[in-house]
Image: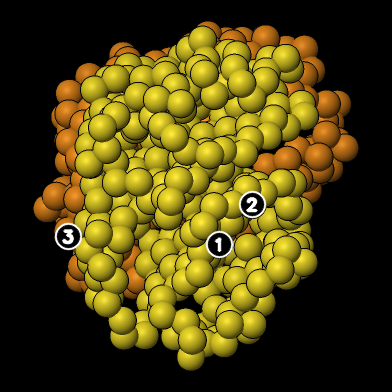
Chain colours: A yellow, B orange
Amino acid sequence: MPLSFWEHIVSLAKADILSHINNDQCDAYLLSESSLFVWDHRVVMLTCGLSTLIDSVSALIDKVTEDKLTFISYQRKNEYLAHLQASTFIDDIDTLRLRVPGTAFRVGHLDNHHHFLFSSDKSCQIMSQDKTCELLMYHISGPVADYLCTEQQTVAEIYKLLLLDELFADFEYDAHVFTPLGFSINGIKDNFYYTLHITPQEQSSYVSLETNVDLEQHQSDIASTLLAILKPRSWDTIGFNTEIAAAIEPKNICVGHCSYPIKQGYNVIFSHYQQTCAELLSPEFL
Amino acid sequence: MPLSFWEHIVSLAKADILSHINNDQCDAYLLSESSLFVWDHRVVMLTCGLSTLIDSVSALIDKVTEDKLTFISYQRKNEYLAHLQASTFIDDIDTLRLRVPGTAFRVGHLDNHHHFLFSSDKSCQIMSQDKTCELLMYHISGPVADYLCTEQQTVAEIYKLLLLDELFADFEYDAHVFTPLGFSINGIKDNFYYTLHITPQEQSSYVSLETNVDLEQHQSDIASTLLAILKPRSWDTIGFNTEIAAAIEPKNICVGHCSYPIKQGYNVIFSHYQQTCAELLSPEFL
């Protein structure tokens, strides 16, 4: 599909395409609200903020037509200010189910980190080597977190501080620093991708990494390295057919854990971690 | 004020008075949505569910008139399904500030347990012996939690299982078991009160205790006893001029802590605890 098609799909989520890179296998679009990756037989789209991802997904299903779809996974995480969102996850799956029969569940308690997941019921067989990792980090701290709150931040310096050259060696990348703060990067190599998004604001910082690089097999311990650099107060890992090993630093406990097999062949593994040392909280005035 | 007045105030929050008890100093009303206590110079009202506490508070301020009010504290906690609430805390304090100037803050992160508090700015001096304790317990477990999920539960048995006779000796009490599940109790002795509410539903259980009995000075360790009986996955303590000691059982870490002085003389102490052992989470289908 041409760029204009993806511009339209992205606009339905209330986002824009800022830039894009591509190789023989994958087109990677950097969005005003996260990222979009397109392969011949797969699309991955992530959005944030007040975007309406469900509208993009609905339009995409309508375009592709349901009979040509093999599998759909639609996810939402616990939100900071859920009441500001245009819809709830329940609203979204009501919309999705008009087009595609599917199973939906929540893992994790409503008063703590949790994850909503919908997957289509259609029979198919996912290959066990089809893996996706997500690392969601909350309330980062330390010198790199401090740097990410400065207005002078640059793509080159963030790339260096996060050791991305080492963690994702030989990946072509496309990155953007937002005003006043914030950073997004897409990386691709062959059919592999990674995407990392940083919202560094002091009272509600959040950093997410998603990749189809198998973190279990990779030469660098990507998750542990990023956790040690960004020192989040808490974090979640979500693996599809892969489990992200528990990190040593920052010192932490696993608060909750779930391994759930989806019948088409994805084992979904959710873990929620929390630093063990007590945080001295400050009141935020309203 | 007569019963009819309080019936009206309570109805504004979309609640009803189920029953009441009183002594020389205090009238205690058990509500369909929690509790109301009235002394000569103080009112404490707690509501839950989809109630609209702010409407009761507004009407009460209008009736009493702002110049006769010494101090107002208005609180909301993190909610399970915030988007279903008729208002946010920010909406509520916008309403309150039309009547009473005040300071508002949030303590605790938005993705974890947190507490919103508004207090009036008017000059006054709270006595240091004026103490209130709140113990908020999430995801209870064990045999008492199991009993609380049975439809055969009785007031007498719950009273016995929670050792309330021992913890709050010589308190007159008024209790109610809800259909299909749920329990509320108000207790009074002289000018002291306690109120305990149980929502035992398996995926979202919640138990709250509030009292002006000084837990630091009391002969029984009320908080530790209830925590050992109800075995919540996580809990918060909020003390006004008192700090609730950390419990030994269930084994836990303090995730976050804040001590914040309000200038009229309340030191507000918030602590959030989490069990250390990982919880095996089950997907909840939607």
The Cα–Cα distance between marks 2 and 3, rounded to whole angstroms, is: 54 Å
The answer to whether mark 1 and mark 2 are in CB contact below 8 A is yes
Instruction: Find disc 1 in the rendering and name its residue.
Output: A38
Say left or right for B160 vs A163: left
Residue A94 versus residue B165 in the image, above or below: below
- Quadrant for the C terminus of chain A in the image: top right
Q: Give the SS element for disc 2.
A: strand
Circle 2: is it few (<14), some (14-19), or many (20+) Cα within 10 Å?
Answer: many
Whether callout 2 and callout 3 share a subunit is answered: no
Instruction: Find disc 2 in the rendering and name its residue.
Output: A29
Chain holding disc 2: A
What residue do we see at 58% from left, 56% from top? A27
What residue do we see at 50% from left, 27% from top? A139
Instruction: Find disc 3 in the rendering and name its residue.
Output: B147
Residue A155 versus residue A64 in the image, above or below: above
**Badge 2 amino acid:** Tyr
**Badge 3 amino acid:** Tyr
> How many discs appear?
3
Q: Quadrant of residue B164?
A: top left
What residue do we see at 55% from left, 78% from top? A96
Mark toward the start of the polypeptide (1 vs 2): 2
Say left or right for B152 vs B265: left
